[in-house]
Image: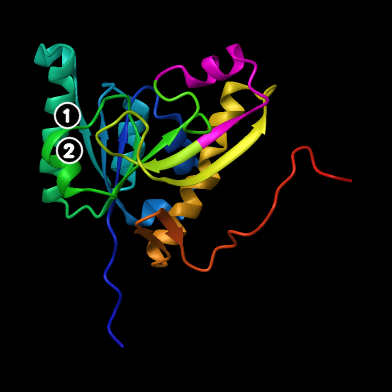
């Protein structure tokens, strides 16, 4: 029996990289297959130090030093990610970044870059989605993990999580931690596929009915 080829993961992060830091803190199994992290909210000394200890390649992007504006940042980052993904033989990327990915990156890594968006898509795409949901008196709020395409939060959905509207922003974002760990297991277990009607998880229960609140 041949050894299964290792699947290499990358992270693209912006802001404080809070979810990646929490994965590192809990020593998530994802880190065993993570070979690259790209952060475009440089500098982040805490993240850099932890990744060096884990021997994970780390790249920082500072747009101010590069004197880039508006869409130039999206183009630059997309080209850089493609270059680094190729160098490190990346198979999948988990995306917690703020820039819109473009051009050849999306073609070469179609259905390979997974974004975690804090709303139940297709409701409230784009920025400040939690605020939009609460301002619109949404009954349920949550997260959607989806493949990145050329639109804004329009790619095929993989998984969603929901909670009541009174949840805090931090607790909503924390729900993404078990989501990413489950999706990681589906990928390395060869259970995640995509067909004409969207994403399919092999052997998943698609017939379950969920009531919120629970029926007692």
Q: Residue at x 12, y 26 (%)?
A: 76
The percent coordinates of residue 187 (x first, y second) are 39, 60
Name the element at disc 2.
Answer: helix
Magenta-span inclusion, residue 129: yes
Q: Nearer the viewer, residue 138 or 67?
A: 138
Quadrant of the frame with the N terminus: bottom left
Residue that appears at 59% across and 11% down: 135
Does residue 1 appear left or right of residue 119 in this picture? left
| Count of marks placed on residues | 2
Coloring applied to the structure: rainbow
Residue at horizontal 66 percent and vertical 33 percent from the top:
163
Q: Residues within 10 Å of mark 1 (few under 14, many from 20)?
A: many
- Where in the figure is residue 192, as x and y percent of width and height? 40, 60
Above or below for 32 versus 145:
below
The residue labelled by disc 2 is 81
* Distance between the alpha carbons at the discs numbered 2 and 1: 6 Å
| 51, above or below 208, in the image | above
Is 177 left, or right, of 211 in this rendering?
Answer: left
Asked if residue 39 can be seen in this view, the reply is yes
Q: Front-most of 86 and 74?
A: 74
Query: Does the CB distance between marks 2 and 1 fall below 8 Å?
Result: yes
Q: Is residue 48 magenta?
A: no
Q: Which residues are magenta?
A: 127-143
The residue positioned farthest toward the right in the image shown: 216
Q: Going by the image, does 185 lie left or right of 136?
A: left
Relative image position of residue 183 (x, y in whole percent): 45, 53
From this view, report whether residue 85 is shown above or below residue 39.
below
Percent position of residue 8, x then y: 27, 56
Residue at 10%, 16% in the rendered image? 66
Which label is found at residue 77? 1
Q: Nearer the viewer, residue 163 or 89?
A: 163
């Amino acid at each position: 029996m041949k050894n299964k080829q290792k699947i290499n993961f990358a992270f693209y992060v912006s802001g404080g990289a809070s979810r990646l830091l929490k994965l590192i803190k809990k020593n998530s199994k994802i880190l065993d297959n993570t070979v690259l992290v790209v952060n475009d909210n440089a500098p982040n000394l805490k993240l850099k130090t932890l990744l060096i200890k884990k021997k994970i390649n780390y790249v920082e992007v500072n747009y101010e030093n590069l004197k880039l504006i508006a869409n130039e940042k999206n183009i630059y980052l997309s080209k850089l990610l493609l270059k680094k993904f190729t160098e490190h033989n990346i198979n999948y990327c988990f995306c917690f970044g703020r820039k819109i990915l473009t051009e050849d990156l999306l073609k070469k890594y179609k259905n390979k870059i997974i974004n975690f968006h804090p709303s139940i898509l297709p409701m409230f795409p784009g920025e400040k989605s939690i605020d939009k949901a609460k301002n619109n008196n949404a009954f349920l709020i949550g997260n959607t993990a989806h493949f990145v395409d050329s639109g804004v939060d329009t790619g095929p959905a993989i998984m969603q999580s929901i909670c009541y509207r009174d949840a805090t922003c931090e607790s909503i974002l924390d729900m993404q931690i078990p989501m990413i760990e489950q999706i990681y297991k589906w990928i390395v277990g060869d259970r995640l596929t995509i067909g004409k009607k969207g994403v399919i998880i092999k052997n998943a229960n698609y017939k379950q009915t969920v009531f919120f609140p629970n029926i007692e």
